[in-house]
Image (tube, grey):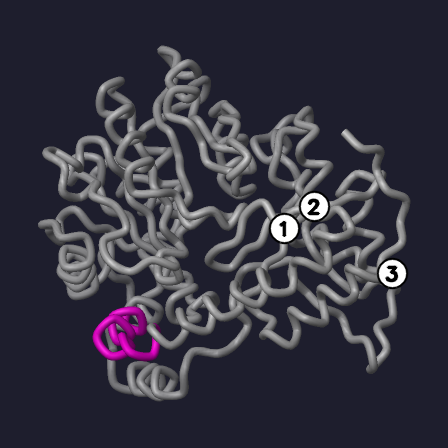
Amino acid sequence: MTSATEHTFAPPVMEARRWLDGVDFPPERPLINVSQAAPVDLPPAEMRAAMADIIVNEPQAHLYGPVLGLPDLRAEVASQWSVAYGASITSKQVAITSGCNQAFAAAISAIAQAGDEVLLPTPWYFNHKMWLDMAGVQAVALPTNAALLPDPEVARRLITKRTRAISLVTPNNPAGAEYPAALVLAFFKLAQETGIKLIVDETYRDFHSQTGVPHPLFQQADWDQTLIHLYSFSKAFRLTGHRVGAMITSPELMAEAEKFLDTVAICPSQMGQFSALWGLQNLTEWLAGERNEILARRAAIETNMPQLTAQGWILKGCGAYFAYVEHPFAMASDKLAQELVKEAGVLALPGTMFTPSDDPNGARHLRIAFANIDADGIAELFTRLAALRFSLAPSS
């Protein structure tokens, strides 16, 4: 039997969790889990109180809603994004989805069919690769440089008559790299020139280290004919279990995406949408505090890195929720990641989960997702990694 799902790999986070089976973690050295980017803390208390009120007093929270989302939430996103990007965005250009992964799936379904191609910078976000696999769309690996940034001219050479889009994630998952505004604009112009779409996943936008307009894409003429912007409320307001995301693009493309969304979920979670709307209207200062905490953890990564650098580790990228590191050991990262569970009490994902199977770079890297460990936890993580005594790889 051959099915769509057989064309892709098992969910990486679920696979990594199986490495914990049968391993004991003593109280004095508990597991440090840096495998998943989703926040594990609950939404703030004031939001949970508002959610309780919505459950009791908002009948619409329990019924089907519009396929493209709650009108008030679409309008709020359009208004706030217009301010954030110095642009003019209308609610007709906004759809609410069941998480950002569904937004990506809807976008691909609206622009591509089996046999088409989409360019993904490597290391790539594995769920994007998985969906392309299941849709029969070829993921074309776009290599990145030493700073983990893709090159528009390299992308140009990879574009064929079957290419339908270039997909970027910034700040990047898994690399942590923040794509400069000029680079994102260069990719927009390339996509516009070649008649393909530019998908920009900004799930981690709220934790960017720089303030101000992240990029000028929404300010470009006819931006919605080229750009498909994706966003997640899961990271901003800790609404991971409520599955609320957003897609911003042209109304014409939205009509195509609506067919997919109606078939898959009928409508996004009403409860999640009302919660996201409340968060947008009431949690601006709270979210700024969350950003400051993530930036402090990023600084802790950089502060602790020298003890690993002395042993041959290299910090390749660090931003938003992620650090992407090159390890110095002779074993490949997929084996190393499993050994870390037993030898260091650390669960991290190997670079092999973010790269094509024939890309040797995957074997040299690990992703550290630090959203759920504070500065003290980061210091302990680096202490444990520094204590490892595996065989070193030969000098290149």
Instruction: Tell me the residue that label 2 is attached to.
Output: 350
Question: Please, is residue 50 above or below residue 105 in the view?
Answer: below
Residue at screen point 77% across, 56% down: 18
Residue at screen point 43% across, 64% down: 235
Q: Residue 379 placed where, x, y %?
A: 68, 71
- Give the SS element for disc 1: strand
Instruction: Tell me the residue that label 1 is attached to.
Output: 367
Q: Quadrant of the N terminus?
A: top right
Mark 1 and mark 3 in contact (Cβ < 8 Å)? Answer: no
- Give the SS element for disc 2: strand
Q: CA distance from mark 2 to mark 3?
A: 16 Å
Q: Residue 186 placed where, x, y %?
A: 29, 30
In this rendering, would 134 be left or right of 366? left
Mark 2 and mark 1 in contact (Cβ < 8 Å)? Answer: yes
- Within-10-Å neighbours for mark 2: few <14, some 14–19, many 20+: many
Viewer-side residue, 55 vs 220: 220
Give the amino acid type for the residue marked by disc 2 in the picture: Pro
- Give the SS element for disc 3: helix
Q: CA distance from mark 3 to mark 1?
A: 18 Å
**Residue 174 appears in the picture as rendered:** no
- Within-10-Å neighbours for mark 1: few <14, some 14–19, many 20+: many
